[in-house]
Amino acid sequence: MRIVTRIIAISRATRLGRELREIDGIIQALSLDARQKLALFTLRELAQAGRCEFPHLYGTPPEKRYAIWGSGADTGLARARSDNPQVRLRGIALWLAVVFHETRDSEHAQIAAIHRQILRVLRQLKESVPENTTNASNAWADTAEAAA
């Protein structure tokens, strides 16, 4: 059974790594203003997912509650590929929130590596928010504490 679990973890990590490269490319192409909006959307999504009973299943329909992983990441990725800028930003935020919670505290090295990359992306988004915006800075700190 351990070998099956390991194979599932490796395949999921490979898929999430591919998706993360795509998401990161989309984020890098955003303007500074769009990144600031994305940072706020991501904060909100992280907070909402953190309040759920199963944060890694955030964005998943209730009938799929007992799946290994939810469909929130797939929904977020589909929205991130949208031509509509608002839908794209909300999709990226959803993907980041779901994958953050899905990869957190994983015992598999490949999935833990994805989590570290997600943390890097979140740090870059945090740095895009101006320092003089105290509400946003406090919200980042509050969300980080709630997610931990």
Image: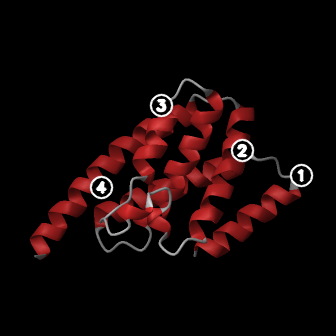
Q: Position of residue 45 (x, y in %)?
A: 62, 56
Q: In this view, does 91 lie to the left or right of 37?
A: left
Q: Distance between the residues labelled 2 and 4?
A: 27 Å
Which of pointers 3 and 1 indicates the residue nearer the eye?
3
Which quadrant of the figure contains the C terminus?
bottom right
- Do tag 2 and tag 3 residues touch (Cβ < 8 Å)? no
Question: Of marks 2 and 4, which one's residue comes earlier in the chain?
Answer: 4
N-terminal label among 3 and 4 = 4
Q: Which numbered circle lies on residue 13?
A: 4
- Judged from the image, the secondary structure of the residue bearing numbered disc 3 is loop
Residue 89: quadrant of the picture: top right
Please report the residue visible at 79 percent of the width from the left and 59 percent of the height from the top. Answer: 137
Do the residues bearing badges 2 and 4 touch, measured as CB atoms within 8 Å?
Answer: no
Q: Which of the numbered marks, if any, corresponds to residue 128?
A: 2
Q: Earlier in the sequence, mark 3 or mark 1?
A: 3
User: Residue type at mark 3?
Assistant: Arg
Given the image, on which type of amino acid does mark 2 rest? Ser
Q: Find the distance from the CA under tag 1 to the CA under tag 4.
A: 37 Å
On the image, numbered disc 1 is attached to which residue?
132
Q: Mark 3 points at which residue?
A: 81
